[in-house]
Image: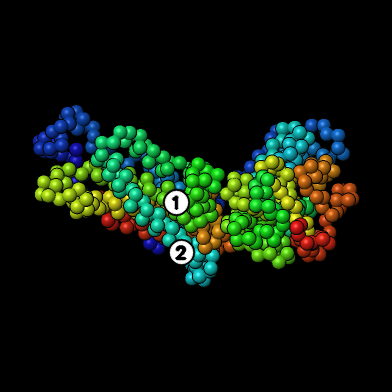
């Protein structure tokens, strides 16, 4: 055991350190050196991991045609994609919040049977390959899908609509919100809400004035993740909703097409999404100091 | 920040200097087996080392060539025992974009001249040779429930039409055909290759689409097809400069251009290239004149 200055503690000093009282004396003699030295065995893989994550981002940053950016971002196809992405991802976020918080509450607080199963099911879209999610959505809500005829009865056809994009994005984003909020709700001390109800507040009022503010940070964090996921959704969108500029071609779809047709525009859009992602990450860290 | 950028740039340079891996790692000098096919022999002389007529190949081919080229690959593999052909089938525009970015391929076959021209500098021996032609077709669900008889019916706003994107060969040809017929269509989706157009109709999501006649044939009973007379696409094939398997790539291209290869393509519905009336060994494609991509035939009025 060493003090902050790096000097070894005398046996007497060691016995004074609270943590040291738990450790048998023999172990105290061996521990110090290992705690200070960074194992080379971990350094190399660690740096490799870092390179893998960081080098592509650096490459994207360096290949972005910065001087042409204003012109590129002004192109019609690019503008359509950006505007559509913003619209759809925010709608998906809204839907996720409105539907997700109640579901999170049910999972965390209610006594409904099968909650563990439901929680597992909610996690599936998180790990499901996006294109598989698209196939599933197609099989459920496509024209020949399980609910296709039912939807047609009501006069709705989802194929190739902006609504389909929002649905696909919600499918992948909702779990983020539900799981984050559910975690926060589970960790809440129920006494606050109990106090509120003994003081006469109804369940809705309690939820809105007591519970919601307490899980606020979790809702924000979940929303940020959900929004980022919705913004980046590609596989499910392109399979379920198709790709048409202005209606269903979101930024990822546009990048996919522009990579072959107009690479500089693709790089510009990619840089925009990268910047958005970085902002979200920074914003998250600022909101939740840990 | 500046120091980080410099360090990062140095890292990037270092990484890129490591060079690329070439997939055509040489096998142990196995020469071609005696030709088993009854067609005219198309084998080149055996060369030991990594470059020989039976080496492994990576072939980039337009999506519409999926079925026919798979069979051509099998023909190549049976002619050269031990060879393995790996295909990448995508929209031609995606393939040539990948090649410009350095994707490793030995042979490239596209569905129109325009996409091939964009990578002229990457070809070993430009201009690429035309090996086939294709014709467009409207597809609908089996039984044609909406009773579509021709291009004009696609303009109906209640009909959901899917087309290839403007730079996808089938999409470009579709738009030219529609324009020539004076029909204005608002597609509900633009797909990146012809097989995706096919699948949207096959899955029942779209009412109609425009693909090639070869795709109609390949889809069999899953779709109903209406041939569109007139504009056809020409398919060029070329060997890439960067390839390490020159002889093998040449052998594959020769196979495609040979009577055996042409017969295979014909069974899938392709039309022969105009030059294919003479023996394959004598022709170098007369591609010096900037011929148009599409050759309108005399009866260019759409069916119905």
Q: Is residue B187 visible?
A: yes
Callouts 2 and 1 close, C-beta under 8 Å: no
Q: Is residue B33 above or below residue B216?
A: above
Q: Earlier in the sequence, mark 2 or mark 1?
A: 2
In the structure shown, which secondary structural element does the residue marked by tag 1 occupy? Answer: helix
Q: Residues within 10 Å of mark 2 (few under 14, many from 20)?
A: few
Tell me which residue sits at (62%, 45%) in the image.
B202
Residue B191 image-quadrant placement = bottom right
Tell me which residue sits at (34%, 49%) in the image.
A99
Q: Quadrant of the N terminus of chain B?
A: bottom left
Tell me which residue sits at (73%, 47%) in the image.
B214
Tag in front: 2 or 1: 1
Left or right of residue A87: residue A144: right
The chain that hosts pointer 1 is: A
Q: Position of residue B64 (x, y in %)?
A: 69, 48
The residue that label 2 is drawn on is: A83
Disc 2 to disc 1, C-alpha distance? 17 Å
The chain that hosts pointer 2 is: A
Residue B168 image-quadrant placement = bottom right
Tell me which residue sits at (15%, 37%) in the image.
A19
Q: Position of residue B234 (x, y in %)?
A: 76, 55
Left or right of residue B225: residue B2: left
> For this rendering, which residue is in front, A143 or B247?
A143
Q: Is residue B215 above or below residue B13?
A: above
Q: Position of residue A37 (x, y in %)?
A: 30, 41
> For this rendering, which residue is in front, A42 or A72?
A72
> Colour scheme in the image?
rainbow
Q: Is residue B231 visible?
A: no
The residue that label 1 is drawn on is: A167
Q: Residues within 10 Å of mark 1 (few under 14, many from 20)?
A: many
Left or right of residue A288: residue A92: right
Figure label count: 2
């Amino acid at each position: 055991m060493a003090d902050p200055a790096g000097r070894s503690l005398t046996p007497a000093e060691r016995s004074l350190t609270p943590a040291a009282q738990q450790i048998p004396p023999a172990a105290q003699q061996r521990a110090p050196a290992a705690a200070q030295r960074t194992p080379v065995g971990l350094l190399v893989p660690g740096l490799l991991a870092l390179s893998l994550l960081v080098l592509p981002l650096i490459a994207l940053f360096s290949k972005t045609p910065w001087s042409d950016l204003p012109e590129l971002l002004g192109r019609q196809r690019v503008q359509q994609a950006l505007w559509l992405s913003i619209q759809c991802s925010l709608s998906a976020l809204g839907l996720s919040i409105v539907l997700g918080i109640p579901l999170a509450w049910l999972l965390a607080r209610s006594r409904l049977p099968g909650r563990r199963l439901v929680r597992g099911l909610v996690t599936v879209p998180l790990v499901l390959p996006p294109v598989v999610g698209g196939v599933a959505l197609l099989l459920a809500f496509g024209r020949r899908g399980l609910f296709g005829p039912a939807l047609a009865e009501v006069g709705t056809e989802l194929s190739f609509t902006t609504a389909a994009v929002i649905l696909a994005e919600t499918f992948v984003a909702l779990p983020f919100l539900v799981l984050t909020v559910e975690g926060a709700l589970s960790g809440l001390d129920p006494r606050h809400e109990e106090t509120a109800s003994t003081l006469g507040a109804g369940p809705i009022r309690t939820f809105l004035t007591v519970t919601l503010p307490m899980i606020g940070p979790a809702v924000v964090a979940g929303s940020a993740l959900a929004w980022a996921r919705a913004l980046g959704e590609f596989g499910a969108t392109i399979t379920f909703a198709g790709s048409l500029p202005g209606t269903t071609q979101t930024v990822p779809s546009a990048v996919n097409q522009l990579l072959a047709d107009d690479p500089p525009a693709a790089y510009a859009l990619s840089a925009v999404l990268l910047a958005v992602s970085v902002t979200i990450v920074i914003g998250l860290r600022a909101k939740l100091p840990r | 920040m500046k120091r980080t950028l410099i360090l990062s740039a140095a890292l990037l340079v270092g990484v890129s200097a490591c060079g690329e891996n070439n997939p055509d790692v040489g096998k142990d000098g196995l020469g071609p087996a005696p030709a088993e096919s009854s067609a005219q022999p198309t084998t080149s002389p055996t060369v030991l080392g990594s470059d020989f007529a039976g080496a492994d190949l990576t072939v980039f081919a337009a999506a519409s060539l999926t079925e026919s080229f798979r069979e051509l690959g099998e023909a190549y593999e049976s002619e050269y025992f031990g060879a393995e052909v790996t295909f990448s089938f995508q929209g031609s525009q995606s393939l040539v974009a990948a090649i410009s970015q350095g994707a490793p391929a030995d042979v490239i076959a596209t569905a129109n001249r325009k996409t091939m021209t964009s990578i002229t500098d990457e070809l070993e021996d430009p201009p690429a040779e035309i090996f086939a032609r294709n014709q467009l077709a409207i597809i609908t669900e089996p039984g044609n429930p909406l009773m579509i008889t021709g291009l004009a019916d696609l303009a109906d706003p209640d009909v959901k039409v899917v087309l290839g994107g403007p730079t996808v060969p089938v999409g470009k040809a579709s738009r030219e055909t529609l324009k020539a017929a004076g029909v204005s269509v608002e597609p509900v989706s633009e797909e990146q290759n012809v097989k995706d157009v096919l699948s949207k109709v096959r899955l029942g999501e779209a009412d109609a689409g425009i693909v090639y006649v070869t795709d109609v044939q390949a889809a069999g009973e899953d779709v109903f097809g209406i041939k569109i007379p007139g504009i056809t696409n020409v398919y060029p094939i070329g060997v890439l400069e960067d390839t390490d398997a020159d002889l093998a790539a040449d052998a594959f291209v020769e196979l495609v251009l040979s009577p055996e290869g042409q017969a295979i393509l014909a069974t899938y519905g392709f039309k022969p290239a105009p030059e294919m009336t003479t023996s394959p060994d004598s022709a170098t494609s007369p591609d010096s004149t900037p011929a148009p991509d599409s050759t309108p035939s005399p009866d260019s009025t759409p069916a119905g």
